[in-house]
Image (cartoon, rainbow, N blue to C red):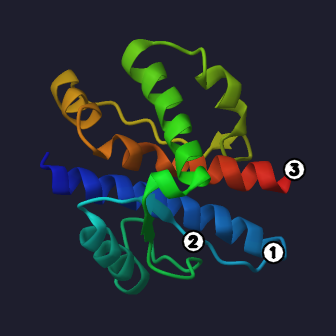
Amino acid sequence: MSPKDAVTLAFEQLASRFDYFLSRLYKQGDKQRGLIIFDKSTYETTIQNLATDFRTIGHTWGVLKNLSEVPLFIDSRASRLIQLADLVAYSIFRRYEHQDDQFFSIIKDRFDEDGGIVHGLCERVTDNKLEKQLSNSKLEGLKFLETAKLLFQKQTQN
């Protein structure tokens, strides 16, 4: 899998799951739209193009309907929310890469779920070589940003 394919896969998971979360809120009368914010990345143009395609052409599970804008990119040094997303990503990385649940155990019950099905965490089983490639790349934050966004949304609801 090329890095571009990994970006496409990760963003499709993130965007479709966030859209699903927002659609459930919409059905409950909460009509706000969502915004995805990423740490600065060399994949900014790719991700913005994917977002546009997912809103017009669609993705594997449908068309995005609940995002208010293409994803925005900001330097994590300037945003506490992006720093929080980094911490969440690190706790998930430690769980899967080093079987260390110390920090993951704190957040594990905060992932978006509906009817007993967890939607806010995507677990993808791959061979070790590919997993090493992904975990050693800058995609680490992208793979897990969805978790932080949904965690933050759930936290602000409570």
Residue 120 seen in render: no
Q: CA distance from mark 1 to mark 3?
A: 15 Å
Secondary structure of residue under mark 1 = loop
From what the image shows, is residue 92 above or below residue 62? above
Compared across the picture, whether 111 is left or right of 73 comes to right
Disc 1 to disc 2, how far (Cα)?
A: 15 Å
Neighbor class of circle 3 (other Cα within 10 Å; few <14, some 14-19, many 20+) is: few
Residue at (37%, 70%) from the top-left corner?
A: 59
Q: What residue appears at the point 57 percent right and 67 percent down from the top-left corner?
A: 19
- Tell me the kind of residue under disc 3: Asn
The reply to whether dot 3 and dot 2 touch (C-beta < 8 Å) is: no
Residue farthest bottom in this picture: 56
**Which label lies toward us, 1 or 2?**
2
Report which residue position mark 1 lands on.
30
Quadrant showing the N terminus: top left
**Image location (x, y in percent) of residue 57:** 34, 83
Looking at the image, residue 137 lies above or below residue 3: above
Query: Crowdedness of circle 1 by 10 Å Cα count: few (<14), some, many (20+)?
Result: few
| Residue 90 x, y percent position in the rendering | 47, 31
Q: Which mark is residue 158?
A: 3
Q: Which residue is mark 2?
A: 35
Are discs 1 and 2 less than 8 Å apart at CB?
no
Check the image and report above or below for 38 versus 95: below
For marks 3 and 2, the one nearer the N-term is: 2
Q: Hey, which quadrant is residue 20 in on the image?
A: bottom right
Mark 1 vs 3: CB contact within 8 A: no
Residue count near mark 2 (Cα–Cα under 10 Å), binned few <14, some 14–19, many ≥20: some
At label 2, the amino acid type is Leu
| Badge 3 element | loop
**Which callout, 1 or 2, points at the residue further toward the start of the chain?**
1
